[in-house]
Image (cartoon, rainbow, N blue to C red):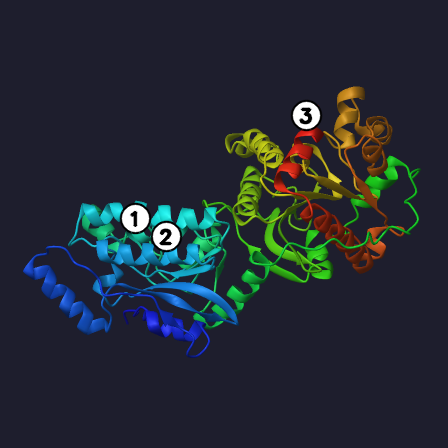
Amino acid sequence: MKRVATPARELIGRVVEPDSFVCWDTPPERGEISPEYAAQLVAAAEKSGEDEALITGEALVRGRRVALVAGEFAFLAGSIGVAASRRLIAAIERATAEGLPLLASPTSGGTRMQEGTVAFVEMARISAAVARHKDAGLPYLVYLRHPTTGGVMASWGSLGHITVAEPGALLGFLGPRVYEALYGETFPEGVQTSENLYAHGLIDGVVPPEELPAIVERALAVLTAAPPASVPDPLADAPAPDPDIDAWESITRSRRADRPGVRQLLRHAASEVIPLNGTGEGESDPGMLLALARFEGAPCVLLGQDRSTQTELEPLGPGALRAARRGMRLAAELRLPLVTVIDTPGAALSPEAEEGGLAGEIARCLADLVTLQSPSVTVLLGQGCGGGALALLPADRVIAAQHAWLSPLPPEGASAIMHRTPDRAPEMARQQGVRASDLHAAGIVDRIVPERPDAADEPEEFCRRLGSVLRHELGGLAELSTPTVLARRRQRYAG
């Protein structure tokens, strides 16, 4: 049975609070059109009950005022012509002017063929309006519905800060019917689906409409949260960590399989977590976790190396760093602080990593971090090995767990270079100053969070302790102006 697209008003009814939707639409203005097209418009209005291919307005979603734009597929397959584009742009601009987050839910076959190139070019104008909304630091959330293809998918359907999609939805640039007409064969099944796009890191989730209000509520709880106030230093009266623990002892402890990683930090210390997925550009590396989060009310974009998913067969690759750079862009666009978490035994050393541009991604991460237009905190949580660790290091404040470390190579590799044997790794670790206490003395790390005696022996307590320190640091940075933050960072990394 052919799947029927969900009507726009039915979707709105599922998502917003009862009787809260206020329509912003005015009657569409048509230029000179052919009698045939005029008849098609009349028929489309009768079929859909709408006067155009989308509805715009505002409503309450879980008590939050949100601007809405929703496509109506029953009106000429949701196609976007000049009148529909003007309605959409007007709604985006009104949301921007009123400082409202915008939830967009397209369903469309793309550009309206009856209007040709003038309608096609409207996609650029729509994208420009979305860009201005995002430039204002306002959230742009997208819920893709079945089907969304063509110019709509290639414009306002693919620009979300967060993008989720209806289960089983047909989503893609080239519609299957067009492909078959052009090439004489059917498009491969399973490619243009919500689930496949999620698997390839192109969207952040696949959720039914009834779950959308909760996602919007949770996302806006982070994206629209007020900057955090400063709080007292939770470790002000705590004894300082022992600076004399041997470097090799710290490295050995950091490699314990039961040591808490970024997922445990979020589970025990964050009050809100909204997972994001992949680069948004066709890659998803399990070694990098990307999320929106709050620590004791302090919002942030968090990107962290996930120790639980990095293996010898799947080490941290260039795709993980491209996902990290997506997080950096989100922090800048949303004017949220960025938190990076370093915990890696090293990035991939393989032909695939070389051909995937690993070195270039490390360089671009470093450049993005030192010029980031948002405050930033780095957490050196465990192993900090090589360029993959360095790529997430530059920040306004750097926190290290007591047994975390940072080095250009694993000590065994440094020993092999210097002594032609890995057996002198402990000696090399001591010589290279890799310990948290050495990094603090060198000015690379700003503060050390104690482990009592080892994070693996007190995972919940340690994560909560680290979360409280992170909250304190975020509050301190929130008191500074952006020019002050940038000036201090330039001085820190000026050499």
Residue 90 horizontal/vertical position (percent): 33, 56
Can residue 261 be seen in this snapshot?
no
Q: Where is residue 242 in the image (x, y as percent from the top left)?
A: 92, 42
Q: Which residue in the structure is indicated by mark 1?
A: 123
Label 1 crowding class (10 Å Cα cut-off): few <14, some 14-19, many 20+? many
**Horizontal placement of 155 versus 409: left or right?**
left
**Label 2: few (<14), some or many (≥20) within 10 Å?**
many
Q: Mark number for residue 63?
A: none
Q: How far apart are marks 1 and 2 (CA)?
A: 8 Å
Residue 397 visible in the current orientation: yes
- Among all residues in the image, which is located at the extreme bottom? 18
Q: Which of marks 3 and 2 is in front?
A: 3
Decide which of tag 1 and tag 2 comes sooner along the chain. 1
Q: Distance between the residues labelled 3 and 2?
A: 39 Å
The residue pinned by badge 3 equals 494
Dot placed on the residue nearer the N-terminal end, 3 or 2: 2
Of the numbered discs in the image, which one, if any, rests on residue 156? 2
Distance, label 3 to label 1, CA atoms, is: 42 Å
Assign a secondary structure to mark 2: helix
Q: Is mark 1 on a helix, strand or loop?
A: helix
